[in-house]
Amino acid sequence: MQPAQEQLSLFEFPTARFPSTRYQGSKAKLARWILEQIDWLEFDSCLDAFSGTCSVAWHLKRVGKQVVSNDVLQFNYLFGQALIENNKIKLSNEDVDCVLDAFCEHGFPNVVQSTFSEIYFTDEENAWIDRTISRIRQIDNPYKSALAFFALSQACIVKRPYNLFHRKNLYLRFANVQRSFGNKTSWDRPFEDWFRIFAHEANGAVFDNGRENKSLNFDVMELEPKYDLVYFDPPYISEKGAGVDYRDFYHFLEGLSMYDQWPNHIDLDSKNRRLKRIPNCWHDKRRIHMAFDRLFDRFRKSILVVSYRTDGIPSANELIKLLSRHKSDVRVYCYGQYKYALSKNTRSEEMLLVAP
């Protein structure tokens, strides 16, 4: 294990602020609690292996660690490039204006317009997305491009009922009914306004912690086991066997991240034009136990920190036993009843396993 840097007090350095996020399963509201539970550990290099929004990776960066964020989804990798790997680059007002310039000398592709009409956004909004992603792809600096992509993604999410892309439900934005969910004011606000807001938030999250941090885009089992500490927040499978498939929920953002190849990956038989599905052990209740066992074995020489729910598959006791096969000391912390947005589960607790 590498010698730890001088301990930094949590949340005193730096003054940057993590952006607001509506990503399902995000640990943004739990990140400080998670870091408080591992504050007694000595470590320097760390891997956030299923980084998602990068909220935990960002807070680890904030306390001076050398951080690597990783996610198998390319759009999450771009989030990591913008907020973790990027130490200094920000979008200027001129950069934002250039992305949002409505004038297009040579036109632009129409992947969203031709594929997603009347599914998620209006025709005018679909044209705006095509034009904006085309301009973002023309940005030479990879960190500016990633920041702009983050802003575009958040703008797409905030204008969606349930903040997801799991259903063809554009009609919900315009139905004249009493609502128990969503925010019609947010849905009706122009894309350009939201883009500017989220570009500003992304800029505010950029800081230099004096370390060389990195964002990766690999399956977790392809990563080298070379870190002092590894944090796992894998997709959750409920006790009923229902898995959380982030690629399915956010396929629209994943498509935007691979814009040129997107049409080749779309399941045209699906009503919501999702991506063709790829088998994944983290969504399969029959394979999930073996997946955890292989994961813990691969990274057994590191400090292991695992986020999961107490009522999932594996169960809390099963997960502790799996981790105990590879670690002699397993400590369990529970946040208590933490309810994610749109979840009706009031019994489940957020659980953190720590194995030095």
Image (spheres, grey):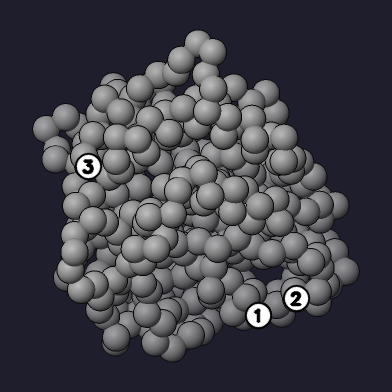
Q: Is residue 312 visible?
A: no
What residue is at 32 percent from the left and 82 percent from the top?
A: 348
Which mark, by number, is residue 36?
1
What residue is at 71 percent from the left and 56 percent from the top?
A: 204
Q: Earlier in the sequence, mark 2 or mark 3?
A: 2
Mark 1 residue type: Glu
Crowd rating for badge 3 (residues with CA inside 10 Å; few <14, some 14–19, many 20+): some
Crowd rating for badge 2 (residues with CA inside 10 Å; few <14, some 14–19, many 20+): some
Q: Earlier in the sequence, mark 1 or mark 2?
A: 2
Mark 2 residue type: Leu
Above or below for 319 versus 260: below
What is the secondary structure assignment of the residue under circle 1? helix
What is the secondary structure assignment of the residue under circle 2? loop
- Measured as percent of width and height from the top left, residue 315 is found at 30, 76
What residue is at 54 percent from the left and 68 percent from the top?
A: 28
Q: Which residue is mark 3?
A: 119
